[in-house]
Amino acid sequence: MSDPSGAENDAAVLSGLLRRQAAICTGCIGAGLGFTMERVLAAVHDLARTEKIEQGMRRCPACGRTKWVVTLEA
C-alpha cells in the first residue's frame, strides 16, 4: 500500500509540472518527473480529486506523439 503523504506529494509535483507545461502526455510526465507509469496514473487520479483536469488522446506538445495527454483546466 502506498504512503498517502507520498501520493499527495506526487499530485502536488504533477500540478506544478502542469502549471509550467500546459499539456503533456503521461510518458513525458514519467520521464520528466522520474515516475513509473503506475505512479503517474496514480498522481493524475489523485490530482483529479482537487483540480479540474482534462485528459484524452491527442498529440503531446512535448514529444509530438499521439498519446494520453493531461491538461489543467483554467
Image: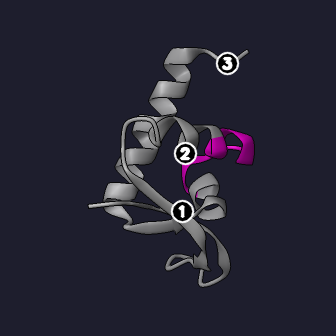
- For badge 3, the amino acid type reads Ser
Dot 3 falls on a residue whose secondary structure is loop
- What is the residue that sits farthest to the left in this orientation? 74
Q: Is residue 7 left or right of residue 22?
A: right
Residue receiving disc 2? 44
64 over 33 or under it: above or below: below
The answer to whether marks 1 and 2 mark residues whose Cβ atoms lie closer than 8 Å is yes
Q: Which mark is residue 74?
A: none
Tell me which residue sits at (37%, 67%) in the image: 22
Checking the image for residue 2, the label placed there is: 3
Q: Which residues are magenta?
A: 32-41
Instruction: From the top left corner, tell me how far across and down residue 44 is, in percent.
Output: 55, 45
Mark 1 touching mark 3, by CB under 8 A? no
Q: CA distance from mark 1 to mark 3?
A: 24 Å
Residue annotated with mark 1: 55
Report the mark closest to the observer, 1 or 3: 1
Q: Is residue 11 left or right of residue 34?
A: left
Query: Residue 31: which quarter of the image?
Result: bottom right
- The residue at the point 51 percent across, 67 percent down is 24
Q: Quadrant of the C terminus?
A: bottom left
| Mark 1 or mark 3, earlier in chain | 3
Q: Earlier in the sequence, mark 1 or mark 2?
A: 2
Please state which amino acid type lies under the numbered disc 2.
Val
Circle 3 packing at 10 Å, graded few (<14), some (14-19), many (20+), is few
Is the N terminus in the top left, top right, bottom left or bottom right quadrant? top right
